[in-house]
Image (cartoon, rainbow, N blue to C red):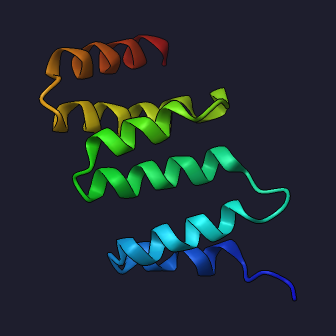
Amino acid sequence: SEPEPLITRIQPLDLEDYDGANEAYGRALECSEVDVNSIRLNQAAVAAMRGNSEESLTLLDLMTDLDYFFPSAAIRVGSLRGLGRLDEALTLADECLDME
């Protein structure tokens, strides 16, 4: 059968159902022709929202597409801040501001 649309799979995130969102992202990774970087970005966002900053950074490190640099940098800054690595967070934020 045809997989359900991605928007249906990520809806739990809107409801703060982080476990449901993670399950949906895991299923999405099993689909063919999926944008893995987009899913990793969303997984990292969920991890950050749950306060799992280390997991968030690990997921961001798996990303390879530079088109996601700024959204991933925003999550990375928050995760670094969550770990108390304020100098790194500020440096990355400044670098992003210089690029824009």
| Quadrant in the rendering for residue 79 | top left
Residue 32 on image: x %, y %: 84, 61
2 left or right, relative to 12? right
Residue 49 on image: x %, y %: 28, 57
Task: Name above or below for residue 30 compared with residue 81.
Answer: below
97 left or right, relative to 78? right
Residue 29 on image: x %, y %: 68, 60
Residue 56 on image: x %, y %: 37, 43
Name the residue furthest bottom: 1
82 left or right, relative to 29? left
User: Which residue is at the front of the view, 66 or 46?
Assistant: 46
Q: Quadrant of the N terminus?
A: bottom right
Q: How many marks?
A: 0
Task: Residue at 36%, 78% (x, y): give it.
Answer: 17
83 left or right, relative to 24? left
Task: Residue at 32%, 75% (x, y): give it.
Answer: 16
| Quadrant in the rendering for residue 78 | top left
Task: Name above or below for residue 33 compared with residue 70.
Answer: below
Task: Residue at 47%, 67% (x, y): give it.
Answer: 22
| Quadrant in the rendering for residue 33 | bottom right
Task: Name above or below for residue 84 compared with residue 9.
Answer: above
Task: Name above or below for residue 28 compared with residue 59.
Answer: below
User: Which residue is at the front of the view, 93 or 21?
Assistant: 21
